[in-house]
Structures are given as C-alpha cells and as structure tokens.
Amino acid sequence: MNKYLVQILLMLFISPFCFASNPEGLREVGEIIGNLQDAVLKIGGSFCALMIIVGGVIYSTAKSDPKQMDTGMTTIKYSLLGLIIILMAVVIGKFIVSFGG
C-alpha cells in the first residue's frame, strides 16, 4: 500500500515539470521556479484540504468528548495555517520572479 502511495505522490510532484518544458529542452530559472511553485501549491493545497476534512470528521464524531473535539479543532487550525503559509510562499516567490526579470 505504501509503495503505491509513494508512486502516486512522486507522479503528482514530477508531472508539472514534465509538461512545461519547451521543445529545445532549455528552461529559464523563472520557469523552473514557477513550475516548482505550482507543484507545491497543488500538493500542499491538496494535503491541507484533506487534513481539514479529517479534522472535521474527528470533530464531528467526537460525541461530546472535549479531548477529541480539541484534537479536531487543532487539526483544522493547523491545516488552515499551513495553507496560508503555502499561499504566502507562492505569492512571495511570484513577486521575486516578476521583480527579477
């Protein structure tokens, strides 16, 4: 099971780089950084969305258990924080690439 999960994650991470190359095979630094940002946004955003769902399920099934409810809310909070950090990193990276050239 873990072997297939690693293969799927690797395929999702590598695919943005494969489809974005130009015919000559040459790339500029800005294009490579842009492709990396897109990959991080897709993978990180998907993981954050999954963790928000997991936190919601934990919170929903807590049945008045304060420790379980706290665990669900903490999972949701940290997932949203991670999503904000990922988005800020992408915005800062795009600003640097556009400023540099």
Image: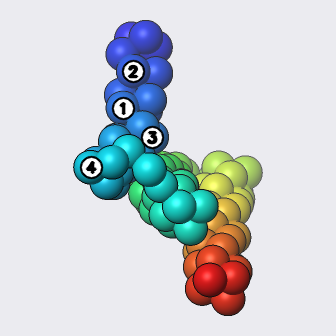
Q: Secondary structure at mark 4?
A: loop
Position in image of residue 33 (x %, y %): 58, 61
Q: Gap between marks 1 and 4, in whole Å?
A: 21 Å
User: Is residue 77 shown left or right of residue 28?
Assistant: right
Residue wearing tag 3: 13
Q: Gap between marks 2 and 3, in whole Å?
A: 10 Å
> Of the residues shown, which amino acid type is indicated by label 3?
Phe
Residue wearing tag 2: 7
Q: Tag on residue 11?
A: 1
Q: Gap between marks 1 and 3, in whole Å?
A: 5 Å
Q: Answer yes or no: do the residues labelled 1 and 2 have beta carbons within 8 Å?
A: yes
Closer to the camera: disc 4 or disc 2? 4
Closer to the camera: disc 3 or disc 4? 4
Residue at the extreme front of the image, as rendered: 24
> Of the residues shown, which amino acid type is indicated by label 4?
Pro
Residue plotted at (53% across, 61% down): 28
